[in-house]
Image (tube, grey):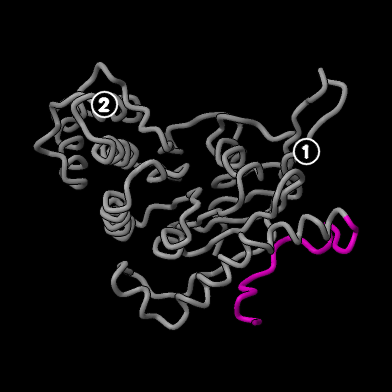
Amino acid sequence: MKEFLVVKDLEKRFPINDGKSELTVFKNINFTVNKGEFVSIIGHSGCGKSTVLNSLAGLDFPTEGEINMLDKPVIGPSLDRGVIFQNHSLLPWLSAFKNITMAIDCKFKDMPKEDVEKRAIHFLDMVGLKDSMDKKPSELSGGMKQRVGIARAFSIAPSLLLMDEPFGALDALTRGKLQDQLVEICDKTQQTTFMITHDIDEAILLSDKILLMSNGPEARVAKQIIVDIPKPRSRASIVKHPAYYEIRNYLVEFLVEGSEVIKQQLINGEITDKNFPIEVNPYKKK
């Protein structure tokens, strides 16, 4: 299978001390995403996860390395890449419906108005907000705003959907409901997705592949977990699969100590960049 997205030797440095030196946030980042695949990335704050996602979106630029999607370099923002941020990023003066029709108009410039409106209603209905389509963001709860953001992102049919902790600010019950909706939508559309999350259970529920980053600075994508639990999944049934707790326990152990151990091994020279790219499914070796 030909890779849909290829990230090669990505490195990001920021100037510090009035430009006299540089801080390397991450380096030697290598991974691929196949079409229709759902990939999550996990790591502690400061390892550069959001910078990686912003680079994929074309909102930031790596210092070194390259990103290619469908054999074309990512050199700036594009409607082929939809983004859902932790903050809903809705335009406050527009209704939920108008927030979505505006996005559709931008992507499909020649689409008749009637079709634009039908498409917006279709995706609002998909996230259960058809009856709230005329409400402005100030009239919606946090979970409803995120659902509008999800509907807007899917309405433009992006080749790649990027999500930066989209449910991180929500209560557990609302987050669970939105996770279930996202599972259903992704199963229906086979949407290629890259997501940042701190929620291990969310990553296992949604992902085909989970990338684990070592601690920054000079973070690496150190491990790769293939979530070989059959789809479609549900939160009720996934915990009964024998691989679930094997994967979950490994992810917890990595975040508690493994990500820092790798950083120290790099500092001490016990491992080098020759040890990367990533080790696949290390939990199975335990």
Going by the numbered disc 1, the residue's amino acid type is Thr
For image coordinates 39% across by 80% down, the residue present is: 241
Q: At numbered mark 2, what does the secondary structure look like: helix, strand or loop?
A: helix
Residue 12: tell me if it is visible.
Answer: yes
Residues at marks 2 and 1, CA–CA distance in whole angstroms: 38 Å
User: Pointer 2: what residue?
Assistant: 99
Residue 189: tell me if it is visible.
Answer: no
Can you give x and y, in whole percent of width and height, for residue 152 in the image?
A: 30, 35
- On whether residue 88 falls in the magenta region, the answer is no
Q: Residues within 10 Å of mark 2 (few under 14, many from 20)?
A: many
For image coordinates 32% across by 47% down, the residue present is: 171
Would you say 19 lies left or right of 223 here? Answer: right
Magenta span of residues: 268-286
In the rendered image, the residue lying farthest to the right is 269
Q: Quadrant of residue 249?
A: bottom right
Q: Is residue 28 above or below residue 143?
A: below
In the rendered image, the residue lying farthest to the left is 131
- On whether residue 282 falls in the magenta region, the answer is yes
Going by the numbered disc 2, the residue's amino acid type is Asn
Can you give x and y, in whole percent of width and height, for residue 206 in the image?
A: 40, 60
